[in-house]
Amino acid sequence: MTTIDYYMTLNSPWTYLGSALFAEIAARHGATVRIKPTKYGEVFPKTGGLPLPKRSPERRAYRMMELKRWRDYRKVPITLEPKHFPSDETIGTRLVIAAALQGKDACRLAQELGRSLWELEGNLGDEAVVAEAAKRAGLDAAAIRRAGPSDEELDRIHNQNTAEALERGVFGAPSYVLPTGEFFWGQDRLEFLDRALAKG
């Protein structure tokens, strides 16, 4: 069984745009997904990237064109400029990591958290918004957090994911990394991931 390490962030529209297709591809190939929320605010400066506000007007304009293209192509009705972007994703990220540790469907949870931000224009810094996303994913946010671990341990894992991503050459979200070290950056590379999994 193939394992895919999934380096992502809830604030990325590209992560959300590819989330449903990625889940379908992984399931079809019987792959195990290890979701690894990552701090791209730390990854970017170490790998030559720039946060959105610091990019040139030309790059920001092209990003909007690409979001419109992929929104239509993937048939995912994202809002191009949601009210709460970027959100403080701390609550949601901690919940995703805790859910993964407990063997729950953390990828589905992350997808619903992405929907909250990118379709429903919710604030991921709002516990009620996060709880409702968990409910849509068939999970109980409060129960997951009660089962632990602590915020400090969850944050440690978040930092560990970030360091690991940098060690493996990851520089953007989402990135899907195979055991061989081959990785695919961006939801627009999912078809290549599909082909690689088919080859075994």
Image (spheres, helix red, strand yellow):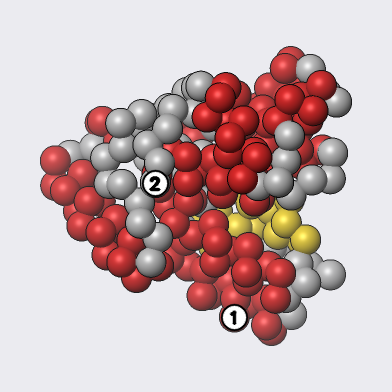
- Position in image of residue 39 (x %, y %): 54, 32
- Position in image of residue 147 (x %, y %): 85, 26
User: In terms of sequence position, does the residue under pointer 2 or pointer 1 come before the other?
Assistant: 2
Image quarter hosting the N terminus: bottom right
Q: Residues within 10 Å of mark 2 (few under 14, many from 20)?
A: some
Q: CA distance from mark 2 to mark 1?
A: 29 Å
Q: Pick the residue in front: 155 or 109.
A: 109
Image quarter hosting the C terminus: bottom right
- Residue pictured at 17% horizontal, 39% vertical: 56
Picture quarter containing residue 175?
bottom right
Q: Is residue 32 visible?
A: yes
Residue type (three-letter) at the residue carrying disc 1:
Arg
Front: mark 2 or 1 = 2
Picture quarter containing residue 160?
top right
Regarding mark 1 in the picture, which secondary structure is present there? Answer: helix
Residue 145 sits above or below residue 37 on the image:
above
Residue 71 sits above or below residue 165 on the image:
below
Q: Which mark is residue 195?
A: 1
Q: Residues within 10 Å of mark 1 (few under 14, many from 20)?
A: few
Please indicate whether residue 9 sits to the left or right of residue 156 in the image: left
Residue type (three-letter) at the residue carrying disc 2:
Glu
Circles 2, 1 touching at the beta carbon (< 8 Å): no
- Residue pictured at 56% horizontal, 49% vertical: 111
- Residue pictured at 79% horizontal, 17% vertical: 150
Q: Which mark is residue 119?
A: 2
Q: Pick the residue in front: 153 or 181.
A: 153
Count of labels shown? 2
- Position in image of residue 46 (x %, y %): 47, 34
- Position in image of residue 134 (x %, y %): 64, 38
Regarding mark 2 in the picture, which secondary structure is present there? Answer: loop
Please indicate whether residue 167 sits to the left or right of residue 116 in the image: right
Picture quarter containing residue 94?
top right
